[in-house]
Each structure stands twice: as C-alpha cells, then as structure tokens.
Image (cartoon, grey):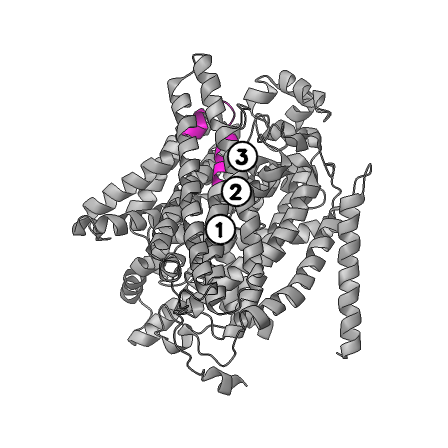
Amino acid sequence: MRFFRTILAALKEIFEESAYERFCSREKVEVSRESYASFVRESSEARNQHIVRCC
Amino acid sequence: MKPSLRVLLWIAIALLGALAVATIALHRGEQINALWLVTAAVCTYAVGYRFYSKFIAAKVLALDAHRATPAERLENGRDFVPTNKWVVFGHHFAAIAGPGPLVGPVLAAQFGYLPGTLWILVGAVFGGCVQDFVILLFSVRRDGKSLTEMAKEEIGPLGGLVAYGSVISILVILLAVCALIVVNALKQSPWGAFTIAMTIPIALLMGVYLRRLRPGRVLETSAIGFVLVLAAIWGGQWASQTPAVGKYFTLTAPALAIAIIVYGFAASALPVWLLLAPRDYLSTFVKLGTIGLLALGIVAMHPTLHMPPLTRFLDGTGPVFAGRLFPFAFITIACGAISGFHSLISSGTTPKLIRRETEIRMVGYGAMLCESLVAIMATVAACVLEPGTYFAINSPAGIAGQLPETAARTISGWGFPVTAVGMQALAHSVGEQTLFNRTGGAPAFAVGMAHIFSSSLGGQAVMALWYHFALMFEALFILTVLDAGTRVGRFMIQDALGHVWKPLGRTSWYPSILTTSGLICAAWGYFLWQGVRDPLGGINSLWPLFGIANQLLAAVALCVATTIIIKMHHTKYALVTLAPLAWLVTVTFTASWHKVLDPDPRIGFLAQARQLAAAGGNARLIFNNRLDAVVTGVLIVMVTLILLESARQWLDILSGRKAAPVSETPFVVTRLAEEQG
C-alpha cells in the first residue's frame, strides 16, 4: 500500500498536481477554474525558465 | 543481514557482473542473449552505487544529514518544497530521460554492441552519475543556484559567460538535431505523420479540458490524452490506407522541416497552458510507461543479439556516421554515459525539492544509473536486428545508393547480407513504404522495439502497431524537448537582450515574445534545414556536433565541480571529477580536431567544403560546412577559456597565492533530523 502511495505521490509531483494542491492550501482557495488559472499564471513564468528536458 | 552474509552477497554480485562483462566482451562467433547486457549493467550499477557513490558521499562531499537544505530553510510551498526522496527521484528521472539515451546507442551500434555497452557502463558509473551527483549537492549548498551562476561565482565572470554561451549553443544544436530525427522518422510516412499531427489537437483539447472542465486534474487528463493518442495510432493505419487522406500526410523532408519550425514558433509564443504544458504531461506519461514496458519486454522476451560485438566499421568508414571508434563512439553516446545537459537539471528544479542532504546520492547518482539502463535497452533494441537490416535503415542514400537493389547490394558487399525483397517485406509488415535510408536512429529503434514485442504480444499481425507506437513515443518526446527547449531559448535570449533594451527582457511583452521566438527558431531552423538538404543525411554532421557541444557542457560542469572540491580543501579527492574531465577534454578536443581539420571529406567539415568547391558544388552546402567548422571552433575556444581560467584558480589556491572562499550558504541545523532521527 505504501509503495502505491509513493508511486502516486511521485506521479502527482511529476505532473504538478501536488503543486496545485499546495497552491490551493497556501492561498486558501478551492479547486476551481479561477484558482487553477491563477496557479498557472503564477507558476508559468518561473516554471518556464526551468523546463529543461534532457536530450 | 549479518555483515558476513552482506559481504558474500556483494562478492556474488561483483562476480556475476564480471562474468557478464567477460561474456559480452570475449564471446566471438556465436550470438549472445540480450540478458547478458542487462545483467552486466545491473551488477555494475549495483556495485558502483553501493561502493563508489558511497565513497564520494562520505569522503569527497561529506554529505551532512544534519545540515538543513534550501527546501527546508526557504520552504515557500512553490519552488522550495521538502519532498519525499522517491518522489524527487521520479521527478528528476522524468526530467533527465529524453531521446538522447535512445538515439545515441542506436547510432553507435554501427561499431557493434560491445564498444557502446562498455562506454555506457564505465561512462555512467565514473562520469555521468558523478557529475549529476556533485552538481546537485553543490547547487543544494548554494540555495539551488544554476550552473551558470555557480560558474560565475566559483570560477569568475568569464566562467559565467562561457557557461551561458555553451548552454545557448548546445540548445540550438540540440533542437536542430531533435527536429532532424523527427523529420527523418516521418518523411514519406503517412501513418507516422498522421499520428504525430493528431497529438497537437489532442494536446490543445487536454489544455482546454484541464483549464475549463477539470482544473488541476493532470493525471486524469494525461490518461485521457494517452487513450486518444492510441486511437490516433490506430487512425494512422486508416489514413495510410486511404489515398484521399494519406496524400496530405505523405510529406517530404523539407515540408516536414517547415511544419516543425512553425510548430516550434507556435509552442514558444502561445500561452503555456494551451499547448506546451499538456503536451509535456502527455509525453512524460507515455515516456515513463514505455520505458517500463520496454524493460519488461527485454527481460521477458530475452531476445538474441544479431549484431556482432565488433564490426569492420571500427576503422572509421561506417555508413551511419563517419569516424573511428575513438573519439566518435564517445561523443555519439552522450546521455546514456555522461551528459552536460543533466547538470542544468541538477542545478534547476531538483535541488529545491531535496529534503535531506543524504538523499542527494540516491537522486543524483541513482537517477543517472536508471538513465544509463535506458541506453542499454536502446543498444539491445538496435542489436536484435539483423545487421543488414540495421545498416539498410541507417545508411544514407548518398552512401548506400538511391535504389533499393543498389543499397541492398552495397550493404551486402560490406558483409551484412540484406535483400531488397526482404526489406520491402519488413517495411510492409510495419506499414511503411520503405525502410531504406531512414537515418537518425528513431526508425531503427522502433523496428527493434516492435521486433521484441511482436515476438510474443500479438505476433507479426500487430508489428505495424508496435512500430508506430514506438515511433510515436520517440517523436512525441523529441517534440516535447523541441517545444520546451525553444521556450527556454526564448527566455535566455530575452534575458540577454533585456540588458541592451529593457522592454525586450519583459517575458510577457508580445513584440519581444514574437521577436525572440523568431530568433531562436531561425537559429535551430537554419541547422535543421542544413541537415535536411545534406546528401549524407544530416545526422552525419549534426549528431557529432551535438555530441561535442553536450560533452563540452559536461566539461564546464566538471570544471565548476573540481574548483569547488579544491576550494573545500578536498584536493586529494579532486580526481573524482578531474579524471572524467580529462577524459572528456581528450575526447571532445580530438573529435573537434577531426570534425574541423580531418582530410577525409566524410569526416572533416573543411575537407568536405573543399571537395564540394572543387567539384563546383552547391554554394550553400559549402557555406554550411564552413559554418559547422566555425561553430565547433567557437565551442572549443569557449571551453579552453573556462579550462584555463579554472586551472589558474586551482594553481592560485594550491600555491597559497589566493584564499579559497567557498560560497556555500552558512550551516543551519535541520529540524527534520530531529523529527526523523
């Protein structure tokens, strides 16, 4: 069970679901179109600088 | 486990690894099973991780479990987040595993399976893993600073400038090579072109779904996207068999090149949520799944390798790329052994997630070992093919011949029997019109992967589906590198131009976005166009250029690492980074010398330019060869500068002429140590 929880946590981190959950809890907002748009806006600039995918 | 049992276990692992390496190195005359390669790799990695990485962690870097990491000290729930080590491991591996470890080993298989396999094993354990590990630790100890910033602080302003120049150069060449691989894989292939074209509306749909219908549900959206991509592979078969549709997707190399340049521009200029992010998610989803599937497939099917351990092309006359085993095998296989690009990731997002210093060993060293295993799997995929088939796919028309019969005769003449009829049957079985002259590595990998899977899962009847699945998988994440890389390149240019005129540095100002997107696309698009028009297939000149650039970036990273180790007064252990640095400098400088000055026109850019000029050849081709020579020369000059500057620093510190301030953030004791014991 713990193994699957870790796999799921890794997938959520890789796919940035956790980042959105952290955003919602930090900003004390619900999951919604508006909050997701704010999350994308906030993270896109900083994130894009670091989207390095290897060769 | 009792200490004595543990010792016995490690002795058994080491002996099994030695037996496997001896088998693949000494076996002659008979074909061997792919499991020997996998066993050699797993045992070597296990011993390397258990002993060498532990030595580096304890003696060289002195990892400190009590020292708070930036993720803990600067935790903000955004960039700096203390994260479970397995989660960071997955995150880091997903970022470093790209098309490089798949393509390089396939191309290097022209020397046989042995040289590539040995270089992947030795290069990873003593070079690539060490680089990723030390750069990650040094970045963690500097609040997650980037390689460029560390080079500037530790070596000097010149170091920073050269690191910046290296990064932007490698990015441009990498993007051109990636695009060229996709062009070569999809030209005259309506099935492949249809499938990949469909991933664009699928990504757009995912973007809208994620933003409007199910905000933030990325895993769910990616799963839907994956199902749609599978449907697109199925649809590709229909498209290729329906002339009215197929004609729109049967594209020439120049047409595909233009389409990809336009795509790169759009991905760079459009809002990130609409195209780039969903595509990135989709690609990662497919990538992790397919790598796992391939590993299972190789272990379950344990196919036989048909490629000999060594081929006659060790002498440098190979058709896939020209040049002798040394130095060209070592720049052809980059990412599976050592890749400078990884140092950008080790000093990017990953250091901001590390919870405890002691976990860096597993993330930095361990993830690179997994990447190296992917390269071994790519070697297996290439070497399960009959050598004649491998060379028929990977030899450019300019060398093997334009017509199938001519190419088959030429390749058979090299001692690798193949027939035009047999190749036609193979092409038919994978749903292609032809498999001759499909250079770039991706089609050969796809045929090999389809061969492995079709030997049990569905048999020959579904070989075409497996082939296009493999092709889609490679093209998808190559295009993801392309669109994300174009955007990063755009940011770097905006950053630099912002110093000249401030508005150009504003990342949300559309005139700046369009100008800088155009500039970066023009830069890699130029090299792509050059590759497409190259009668030798383009890969022959661009892949070595990419390999040289990538390994030179690794040399920059190792210069930074060695400087920091010397500043830490751990000089007696400096060989840990100095030895791979010396090897890389030897390899890349020798390769560069050959690529610029070798009198053989197939190898030397200037010799080819001279030959073309003497024959009254195309002025553009002559110019391109001279340009490639200049680019190689500039890269070498830049790295020479950083080497000299680093060496000056080392001598100054060691002779006591200069103090050695280490620019680490001050020690703060971690709270997590108390919490976790």
Q: Seen in the image, is B185 located left or right of residue B508?
A: right
The secondary structure that dominates the magenta segment is helix
The answer to whether dots 1 and 2 both sit on one chain is yes
Picture residue at 60% right of the left edge, 54% below the top? B124
* Number of residue marks: 3
Q: Which mark is residue B440?
A: 3
Residue placed under numbered mark 1 in the picture:
B555
Q: Position of residue B107 (x, y in %)?
A: 59, 37
How dense is the environment of label 1, judged by Cα within 10 Å: few (below 14), some, or many (20 and up)? many
Q: Are marks 1 and 2 in contact (CB under 8 Å)?
A: yes
Residue at the spot 17% in from the left edge and 52% down from the top edge = B502
Q: Position of residue B138 (x, y in %)?
A: 45, 66
Amino acid type of the residue that numbered disc 3 sits on in the rendered structure: Gly
Cα separation, mark 3 vs mark 1, equals 26 Å
Crowd rating for badge 3 (residues with CA inside 10 Å; few <14, some 14–19, many 20+)? many
Answer left or right for B392 relative to B604. right
Q: Please identify the quarter of the rendering in which residue B237 is found.
A: top right
In the rendered structure, the answer to whether residue B221 lies left or right of residue B387 reads left
Q: Which residues are magenta?
A: B528-547
Question: CA–CA distance between discs 2 and 3?
Answer: 21 Å
What residue lies at 52% left-to-right and 25% top-to-bottom?
Answer: B536
Estimate the spatial distance between the alpha carbons at disc 1 and disc 2, rounded to whole Å: 9 Å
C-beta proximity under 8 Å, tags 3 and 1? no
Mark before the other along the chain sequence, 3 or 1: 3
Residue B139: image location, x then y, percent: 43, 65
Q: In the rendered structure, which disc, 1 or 2, sits on the residue that comes first in sequence?
A: 1
Q: Which residue is mark 2?
A: B588
Residue B652: in magenta span: no
Vertical comparison of B70 with B207: above or below? below
